[in-house]
Structures are given as C-alpha cells and as structure tokens.
Image (cartoon, rainbow, N blue to C red):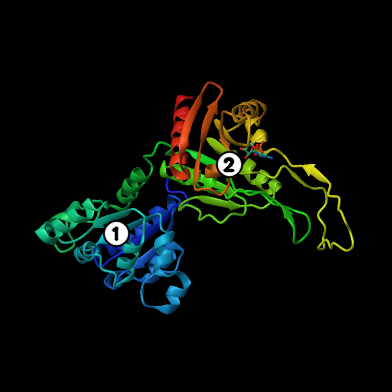
Amino acid sequence: MPRLFNRNFIVGVTGSIAAYKAAELTRSLIRDGANVRVIMTEGAREFITPLTMQALSGNEVHIDLLDTQAEAAMGHIELARWADVVVVAPASADTIARLVQGRADDLLGACVLATKAPLFVAPAMNQEMWAKKATQDNIQTLSERGATILGPDAGSQACGDIGAGRLLEPDHIVQAIADTLTTGALAGRHIVITAGPTREPICPVRYISNRSSGKMGYALAEACLNAGARTTLISGPVNCEPPVGVELIPVETTRDMFDASLSAAATADIFIGAAAVVDFRPESVSKDKIKRGGASSMDLKLIANPDIIATIASGHPRPQVVVGFAAETHNIVAYARAKLQEKALDFIFANDVSDQAIGFDSELNGGLLISRERETPMDVTSKLVLAEAIVAELSQSLDAL
Ligand code: C5P
C-alpha cells in the first residue's frame, strides 16, 4: 500500500525560481498514491506553466478566486474541504507573509484559511530574504499556529548566493509529510467498518429497513483515520458526512454490503461491524409497485440474509480483530456474550437501545466493550469520544497479538 494512498493533497505553488520543483513534488505525491490538485499563484505562473502542472497532477490547475466558471466547477470552499493536506511548495517570502496575515484575496490564501487540513510550508527564497527578521518572525508565527515548516535547505542558490533558502528536495518533502501523517497508533493498518442500515426492496417504491443513523460507524471511521489508519467505510443509506480521507463504499442491500465487506476484509487488520444489517429480505421483489387493491392483508415471505460479520470472523484468513455491535433492549450482557461466542468475534460492544438518551439517532452512546477475557465499561459520551476510546482498546489488542 503506497504511503499516501487516497490522501487528497493541495499543492500550492508560488512565485519562486524553485517553482519547477513543484512538478517533481507532484509526481512523487502521485507515485505515493495521493490525489493532487494544484493551486498556482500569479507569481508561480511566471516560472512554470499551469499546463505542466495539469499534465502531472491529472487535474485542471486552480488559479482564480474570482473566476465564476472555475468556482462553479470546484469552488475554493469545496477545494478546502476536499483537501486532507495542504502543502505550499515552494513558499515565497511574500506568500508566507500573506499566510501570516490571513489574506484571502487570492485562491491559495482563501483555501488555506478555509481548510481544516494540516498545512505544510516549504520555504524557498534568497538566503538574505530568509534570514531577515520579518521572514523569521512570520515562520515562527505559522509554526506556532500549527503549520509544519519543511526546510529550507542550505547550499548554492540560483541567484549565486550560498546559504539557507533552497527548497527542500521534493522526495524529502514527501517523506517528511508521510512521517507526520503516519505516526498514529493505527499507522500502516487497514480498518474496515460497516455502518448504517441496509435496505431490502419489496417493490420499486417500498423497502424493509431500520432506524440506524450510521453515526456510530462514521464516528469509528473518523477515530480510525485520526489514529492514522487506512479506513474503508461500507455504508448503507445515511445522512452522515463521510470523514475526510475515508474510502467510502456506499451500498444498499445486505448482499451488497456482504460482497463489499468480504472483498475489503481480505486486506483488513480490524473489521468492525457497526451496521444494523437487515437480517431477512423478501423472497421475491415485485417488478411493479404493489397496489393495495381491495386486499385486507398481504403475505410477504422473507428469507435469511447472510451474516456478514460471522462469515468474516470464521473465514481463512481473517482480520486479526473482528468487532461486533450488539444493540439490545434487555439482558444486554448475556445476549452480547452469546453473540460473541456464536459469531466467533474478538470484541462486542453492547449497548442498551431502549435507553432514549443513547438509542438510535442519538449523538450519545455508551455501554460495555466485551472480549472473551474482560468487560470494559464505557461511559455515555459523544459517539466520537466513545469511538476514540474503542479504537484505542482495539489498537492495543492488535499490538498485543
Ligand atoms: O443483528 P445482530 O444483533 O446479530 O448484530 C450483531 C452484529 O452482527 C453487528 O455487529 C452487526 O453489524 C453484525 N451483523 C452482520 N450481518 C448480519 C447481521 C448482523 O454483520 N446479517
């Protein structure tokens, strides 16, 4: 798996003689599995053409903040949300000063302000400009605000000077970013999560489903991403925003979820079944809308769907850790323990869905994380905080194996 697989990068290129090295940087990022969109400032375009960057990134280059056509295709807010990482390389003294001021009168400045993605800045300028207190203060400010400063290197410069101010080599920039992004407890691991309900059609307009909101599964995916994992989220129809960086596989029926889960689980270290899977489906699906007519009742024959998690947990090879969810209304621990055994799971998270505060669609959840050896109570809290706690336990158990 390439280090930056499926990570979305904005590469901001600014007006520096080192702008040509942004081409090599883009190639390296793509080789490492990243998706790259390039923003070029006006100055950058004096040194390297957008056509070069377009050909290398495979995407149209983003230039103007006020171009309605470009904004309609992918506006600055959309671009800012799309990014998992923003890297400004080369970053000129002027761009660094503008980022410190929070200027938003060009596309790069506006995107940096509008994004939640981590910011990496690789300065490149004449050694005298780099050494100036103004630049040093600006770099210090960016760093204090959370940006990672990469370089610069020292050596002979295009202007004939010798000193600090050369752009760090593109491969070193990629290495430094990959190191920063892959230091979480689940770095290098692949986690597959099912979430939400499934739907089983009866006819073209009706289906059988349940009240699962998907929030817990989506929170788990976010927690796994935050821990540095490659995260695949196989989701039934829900209204949740997929976390940035997740590999989302939307599905509808249980059999769709089954197929997607089996194929994703083949490379997974952990499989988490947080979906509320519909266990039975109509034996046959009517091609046309079923009309009531004068009928006072209707028979619907249902047949069993495959059990996704049980199939994965008893497969060979299987993910090292398989985790189920047990939403129960009574005898919670006993039912959950029985399920742990029957489905050959390593963990099961048991919760009481009869409790209104933590039931379906709630922002809160709590319960017991049960393994064969122990039970860990988890207090009611937000689903994301709970997900982080569950993921911390799972990554520990993975390390212990
Ligand atoms: O529905 P049940 O209470 O048996 O669900 C327990 C666990 O099994 C959950 O993690 C759920 O995602 C999983 N499951 C499954 N496939 C099914 C039914 C349930 O993966 N057909």
Tell me what residue is drawn at x 52 percent, y 31 percent.
Answer: 368
Q: How many angstroms separate mark 2 from mark 1 (CA)?
A: 41 Å
Q: Work out whether 288 lies above or below 33.
A: below
* Quadrant observed for ligand 1 in the rendered image: top right
Q: Is mark 2 within 8 Å of ligand 1?
A: yes
Q: Which amino acid, mark 2? A: Ala
Tell me what residue is drawn at x 24 percent, y 63 percent.
Answer: 99
- The residue under label 1 is 89
Dot 2, how many residues are within 10 Å of its Cα: few (below 14), some (14-19), or many (20+)? many
Q: Which amino acid, mark 1? A: Ala
Q: Work out whether 283 lies above or below 16.
A: above
From the viewer's perspective, tell me whether residue 293 is left or right of residue 159: right
Residue 321 picture quarter? top right
Q: Position of residue 349 (x, y in %)?
A: 55, 34
- The residue under label 2 is 274
Q: Position of residue 83 (x, y in %)?
A: 41, 58
